[in-house]
Amino acid sequence: MIYAGGGNFEKTMEKRQGSNIRPIISIMSMGNMATASSICANGEIFNKTVSLEFKCETGIIYGLKDQKIGLEGEDISLSCVNTDFMIVDQDCSYYSFNTTIQKRIDKWFIDQCNGKQSSYEQSFYGKIVDKSNIGIMLVLFDIVVLILYLISLGFLKNFQKIDALEINGDVMKCSDFSILIRNLPTNPNVIEYKAWLWEWIEKKLAEHDDQDQNNKSYIPKIVEIYFGYTDYSDFGDLKEIRSLEKAMIEQRKKLKFDKSGQVENYRALQKIVGALKGKIEEYEKNSKKREKKLIPKFAYVILLHENDKKRLLNLYDIGWKRKMLLKYKQRDKYNSLCFDNGQFPDLVQAPQPSLVMWSNLKFDNIDIFKRSLQINIVTFLLMLVSFFLVIYGKYQDKIIKKIYGGDQCKLDDEITQQMAEADFKQPREGRHGLMHCFCLNRYTSLGQEVVSIKFDDSLYYCSDWFDIYTAKNGYVYYAGFAISFVNILIKFVIGKISFYQRMHTLNEILENTTLKMFLFQVVNTGVILMLVNWNLKDELGLPDNFPVLTGDYTDFTVNWYQKIGVQLFVYFGLKYFATFWDRKFRPCNKRRTRQYIQEDYQSQYLGPPFGFEKRYSSMMAVIFITFIFSAVLRVHQKPVMTDGDLANKLRVVLSFAAVWHLGIAFLMMSSESIFPLVSLFNDNQYQKKQNEMEAKFSLPSFLAFIDEKRLNHDHSFLTFIAFFISLIFSLFYDTLVKLLIKLWNKIKNMIGCKQKASKMQQFDDILSIQEIKTQQYDFYEAIGIQGIISEKKRSQQSLEEIEKFMKDNEVSHKLRKLHHRFIIKIDTLDKLLTKKQQDAQSLLKRVFLQGLMNKKREKEGLKRVDDPELAFKDVSFPCKVQGLLTYDIKENDFYKDVYATAERLDQIKKEIQILDADNIDVNSIAEIRNLINS
């Protein structure tokens, strides 16, 4: 449908202008269906005799100019006139006039212009499509799209599993062998605590195993226990020192290359050097006095066998309900599983070492809840800013009605200048909006020249009206900008303070941040607009000045699409162009950089951090808002497929977008202004007939808020049924998907449908990886030769710490057993390492001899035997564990840089001595240049 018109439209071929942007933006909107009983046409013949152009908007025909068809004037609007060509019924019905005039114009156009140069034939002349049929087509298409959308989510679930298997293969993670123990009892000494916990876990595993710990072939079932690093304040001080060091390097580069502002740069450098010097002194002073202690709250235990981890998890997986009742009953039943002090351990699957936020482990769940509440309050305050901006825009939208007494104008009302002036001079409560209608009518034909209309009292009332009317129309775009601005603030604030919440793992931070961004953006974008502009004050008994649910719309009318719909369009348009703005409209110049520090320059080529929370929250907000108001819009692109827990959770949330979509689509499809149930020419008869119409269906009491007449349309009834089906499907999504897959497989087997082996081979190979992953490895075999060397080194360091503690303190029996276990562990690693090295040497010899044999066979023209390099690659004892192999904090990349800063303190202090020159005159450019050159 072609939709155009509005103000500022010139009616001359020499100076023709387009309409304002607001109605044009609503192209493809279902609100256009209410503007005409059938589709408006737009044709133009370029020759001397015929100039035909007409556009339709709410019953007004613009630019219909030709003397031969009986129209005497250039500017003709729709009114109760009767000419040879324009026939209007006695009630001035818009539907009757529009249908009649369009048929006559189409017929005249074909008779006069068919077959001539630059003309075309209207193949749909005389064929009218009923709106109810259009509604059925829209609903059926909508349901098909939603079915495909839900099916795609089902396929996405399976593809996520396949992708994970295909990418990872038989590679394992350290977390596959690890458990996390929370709710630990307190103990003043870390080494004693490790000995006690090690003995307790070994005891629990021994209750289900017959292996004797005194046996010479006994190998400890635990690889290592980690509690995190010992001093959080040290890490914070070193991190600040590193930040100041980077600022110092950056400022030195600026001082060297920026010749114009050397004095200012030197002063800024001195401030950074002073702060860095003071921070180093504070760190060294506190580190001497600080007594390093560790109060363990979490224990990360790496077990030798994966089966042992599964047994412990199954043993302590009693459900949260039983855990809550342990204080009151069933104590004796689970007493053997508790700690020595009677406390039930909280034992769960451990996260990957690279995901643990070690500095957050000192915060408990109460601290996390408090911080999360603070973040929600800050974000809610930002949403209040958007809410008040929309409320203010709503007030501006009603200002014409408040000043002029009304903002609704009828097309057949002829208002003179004197009538408008007399009405405006009345008190505000006695005005009827005639001045507004008079100026609007003149603005339609004159455009901005309406401001020059002079009234009898020598005042220019339409000039003030034009300013108010322009500001009122600007609200449509202002609200979209306000929503976009607040959404940017919400994402920025939540992204910046997400770590403030102090979640214990990076996955928890990403999931929490994603859901917060998503929910707040959906509420700020869609829900606030609905609350402010929807009108339920009669149903809820709200006063007129109540800020929400007292708007202008009780249904999805044409005005809703033109105002609220355009606001959403502007918002999404800004999101689209924000990408190019962020790249400074130079998307191809990725090598340009303003970095001064080498590691920052290198990060330009590594690419920015992949922000899952920002991508997922933005994607989900767009999908939700689009699904809410998109019953007849284009289909959104398929969401990006990725793996991981975050993707799985958000996939379930996305299924509810279809439910919300169909709920709003039902209100749109059942709107009387879009799909009228009766087609009478007289508006009074139409209203009377509509009131007399009975509802075809009755609804249960819990749906009493829905007008039962909305179900009289076939297409709205179909949408209503689809809504409840989608609700049930979303609530039981996983179960229904599994049933549908099983049903589909049975149908294929029944009809004898078999895929070719070549097409299924790749899929079968991927699924076979799942069988490979079921093979059981012990931890030492999985980490490879290099991993064994690193683990032996860490074990020797732990053994040295234990022996040092045993010399200075009283030794318990459990500590002696821990010392013995570490000796056995190191001996086991030595034997395993020796065996793997011997196997590698024998393999190298075989590969060398096989290579010589292949060269000889090539000279003799014989076929080569198996490639020795491939054989070496398959049996070279690779590391099967992906990522970090330990929960030792010093192996974490995030903390390595901080500990490296501690080792560079002497070098940093030397640089400070060079730069901290007190005898330099800061106002002397010559002395500063000499310092730089030195």
Image (cartoon, rainbow, N blue to C red):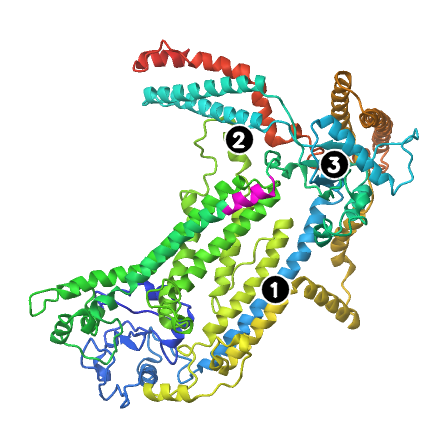
Q: Nearer the viewer, residue 822 or 891?
A: 822
SS at mark 2 in the image: helix
Q: Main secondary structure of the magenta part?
A: helix
Question: Residue 311 appears at what percent x and percent y?
Answer: 81, 45
Mark 3 and mark 2: Cα distance apart in space: 36 Å
Mark 1 and mark 3: Cα distance apart in space: 41 Å
User: Quick check: 680 above or below 25?
Assistant: below
Q: Which residues are magenta?
A: 364-373
**Mark 3 or mark 2: which comes first in sequence?**
3
Regarding residue 642, the answer to whether it shows in the image is: no
**Mark 1 or mark 2: which comes first in sequence?**
1
Give the left or right position of residue 290, taking residue 835 as reference.
Answer: left
Q: Quadrant of the C terminus?
A: top left
At x 29%, y 63%, the residue is 397
At x 53%, y 84%, the residue is 697
Question: Residue 214 appears at what percent x and percent y?
Answer: 91, 30
**Amino acid at the residue labelled 1:** Leu
Which residue is disc 2 drawn over?
602
Mark 3 or 2, which is nearer the eye? 3
Tell me if mark 3 has few (under 14), some (14-19) or many (20+) residues whose alpha carbon lies within 10 angstroms of its own: many
Which residue is disc 1 drawn over?
150
The stretch drawn in magenta includes residue 470:
no
**Mark 1 or mark 3: which comes first in sequence?**
1
Question: Residue 359 appears at what percent x and percent y?
Answer: 59, 33
**Amino acid at the residue labelled 2:** Gln
